[in-house]
Image (cartoon, rainbow, N blue to C red):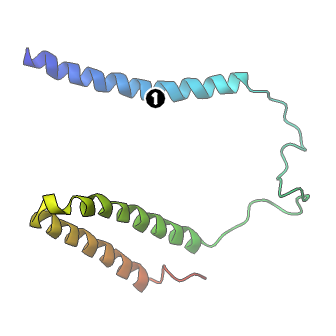
Amino acid sequence: MELNVYQNNYLIVFVFLCLGVLLPVVALYLGKLLRPNNPSDEKNTTYESGIEPFHDSRVQFNVRYYIFALMFVIFDVETVFLYPWAVAYDKLGIFALVEMLIFVAMLLLGLVYAWKKKVLRWI
């Protein structure tokens, strides 16, 4: 009896996994079949606020901008983890306080490392 319940749990996960893959694939394929497809040179040009394109649209950016943006996203997302902890602080106790201090220390260590590597300089 216990083995049947165990296998049933894996069957449910497998069904959801198949649905998670199958539904987007079917939706994208149906979209490709149903959309109008009439390419032309005018439609394939870059559009910039009604101004005629005067050079290649692929402009090379400094990699520092991407690293700066990734650093922002990482620290922004990590601070979201502080909110549930702060709301439930009274119920969690001293163990959660120590865990959160370790978490914040790791964030500060990453920030200091990025600062030392001069990643945070906007050039």
Instruction: Classify residue 20 as left or right of residue 95.
Output: right
Question: Is residue 9 or residue 92 the one in the foreground?
Answer: 92
- List x then y, in percent, for residue 27: 58, 26
53 horizontally vs 108: left or right? right
Quadrant position of residue 33: top right
Q: Position of residue 87 (x, y in %)?
A: 26, 60
Task: Locate residue 25, reporting x and y percent.
Answer: 54, 27
Quarter location, residue 108: bottom left
Task: Answer few, some or many: residues within 10 Å of disc 1's Cα (few below 14, many 20 plus, some between 14 and 19).
Answer: few
Check the picture and name the quadrant holding the C terminus. Answer: bottom right
Is 120 in front, or is 61?
120
Q: Which residue is at the front of the view, 51 or 87?
A: 87
* In the image, farthest residue toward the left: 1
Figure check: 110 above or below 10: below
Secondary element at tag 1: helix
Q: Which residue is disc 1 drawn over?
A: 21
- Quarter of the figure with the N terminus: top left
Q: Amino acid at mark 1?
A: Val
Q: What residue sits 78% from the left and 59% below the top?
A: 57
Q: Nearer the viewer, residue 50 or 110?
A: 50
In the drawing, does residue 64 fall left or right of residue 117? right
Residue at left offset 30%, top offset 27%: 13
Is 122 on the left or on the right of 82, as rendered? right
Question: What is the count of numbered marks?
Answer: 1
Residue at (50% x, 25% y) in the render = 23
Measured as percent of width and height from the top left, residue 35 is found at 74, 26
- The structure residue drawn at horizontal position 47% and vertical position 84%, both measured from the top left corner, is 118
Q: Quadrant of residue 78?
A: bottom left
